[in-house]
Amino acid sequence: AARFLPWLVFVFFLCFWQSLRSVFRRPLVVFVDKLCIAQHDPALKAKGIRGLSTFLDRSEELTILWSSRYFTRLWCVYELATFLRHGQAQQVKLFPVAMARVLLVIASSSVPARILDDFNYILGSSDIFAAVIQVAC
């Protein structure tokens, strides 16, 4: 039973983290420009871009998901310049989008091994491949 405790804790926090966090701290507000600014209508897009400065003036941190196209979009340059005008360079976090692929590969390769290890424990087999064969049959 103790072996499954980490899985239970994980599922609990996955489902209830936002509720628990709101008890101890103010709610975390995230603004994702690509999702929060209309992309389908040029007039709405312009209005959303004009409102960026208000949101950025109240922001504590700017996280940039950087790709080689980031600085080719004028609104991205505007976003960064607006945030930096108050001298908050230390609050800019830059994450290369390509790194997400690497992390996904690492995470996805470790999950099957963990599941097979749990089956090994459940079945009491010392050979992991024997456990997989027992489950498959």
Image (spheres, grey):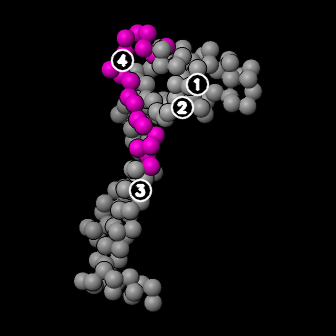
Dot 3 amino acid type: Val
Q: Is residue 118 left or right of residue 79?
A: left
Of 28 and 33, nearer the camera is 33
Distance between mark 4 and mark 2 Cα atoms: 21 Å
Q: CA distance from mark 4 to mark 1?
A: 20 Å
Disc 4 from disc 3: Cα separation: 31 Å
Identify the disc placed on residue 89.
4
Which image quarter is the N terminus in?
bottom left
Q: Residue 112, how many percent across, how many down?
A: 39, 68
Asked which secondary structure carries label 3, the reply is helix
How far, Cα to Cα, is label 1 from label 3? 29 Å
Q: Residue at x 43, y 29 (%)?
A: 63
Q: As drawn, which residue projects farthest toward the top?
A: 86
Q: Is residue 92 magenta?
A: yes
CB-based contact (under 8 Å), mark 1 and mark 2: yes
Q: Few, some or many C-alpha atoms within 10 Å of disc 3 (few <14, some 14-19, many ≥20)? A: few
Numbered disc in front, either 4 or 2: 2
Report which residue position mark 3 lands on. Answer: 105
Gap between marks 3 and 2, in whole Å? Answer: 23 Å
Q: Kindly indicate whether the residue at mark 1 contacts the one at mark 4 (C-beta within 8 angstroms).
A: no
